Image (cartoon, rainbow, N blue to C red):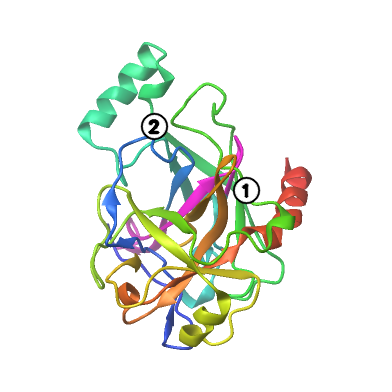
Amino acid sequence: MGTVTETVHNDTNFHPPVAMALIGGHSIPRGRWPWLVSLQSKVVINRIFGIFPVYRYYWCGGSLISDQWVMSAAHCFFGENSKAIPATSWTARMATNSLKPNIRERVLHVFGKIFRKMKWRQWNVKVERIIVYPDFQINDFHDDIALLKLTHPVPTEIISTLQPVPLAQKEDILFPDAGTLCMMKGWGCTEGGGSVTKYAQELSLPIMSNDECSHYFGAVSDEKICAGFTNHAKGICRGDSGGPLVCPSPHGWVQVGVASFTSKDHPENYPGVFTRVAKYRDWVDQSMRLYS
């Protein structure tokens, strides 16, 4: 896949899970989480003899929150030397569980176009604009949230494998309770230090109180929500940054978090820290209205 650079916090105990996925997770079938998005970027960093391009690849997770908007983590969109990665280099891959299209998917996609079978198709849509939360700073994890506007809407109203995720409301700042089992999804390593996998995985993670989480990462403010285990060989790992943490509610699954960071050295033994969606709900709604 080429060379992947990472945005690394200046405290070596923390590691943003850029190009991260799930340790201890299980593979999921296509369509199980219809809002799951793989965000992928390919940037030219050099040219051999001034002609042949050399690429650097970046990838992160995300969630479809409307027919033309994706939510992810802000740190995903900064590469080497904290330089912003161009929005136009990013593609949102949706309605699939694979990181890259396999032969079967390619054939189904072609026939889906020919016979107008939308559910057979995968969707790879270019990104038009990236909106990073105004107070985000690349040297820390505060306000680690971003919105991506796609170049065109996707047909969420007619495809069951392509659906936006309901977001936590701003009044849900205390939801869910500690101990609630929530779900995280993503692509990538199944063990610490491993490489990304070809197919998305899911992992059930219990919500951890911010007080308890602070024992592992220092003070954790209310803009964050923690989920995961300690010393269970399970957790977020190395493509999963920006992915959605969803929790059960009386009305179905609700996205409460955006994957932000975990332990650098032993992610399998530490909880993950997520940006709390409810804290930013006003900004999300206002930004979508402003740029739609």
- Give amino acid for label 1: Leu
Circle 2 residue = 122
Where residue 149 sits, quadrant-wise, is: top right
- The residue carrying mark 1 is 167
Q: Amino acid at mark 2?
A: Gln
Q: Is residue 249 left or right of residue 279?
A: left
Whether the magenta-drawn stretch holds residue 45 is answered as yes
Percent position of residue 228, x then y: 41, 68
Which quarter shows the C terminus?
top right
Whether residue 100 can be seen here: yes
Q: What residue is at 47 percent from the left and 88 percent from the top? A: 11
Expressed as whole percent of the image width and height from the top left, the position of residue 165 reads 56, 42
Mark 1 falls on what kind of element?
Answer: loop
Estimate the x, y position of residue 119 in percent, counting from the top left: 40, 23
Residue range of the region highlighted in magenta in the rendering: 42-70
- Name the magenta segment's main secondary structure: strand
Side of 288 where 232 appears, left or right: left
Dot 1 surroundings within 10 Å: few (below 14), some, or many (20 or more)?
A: some
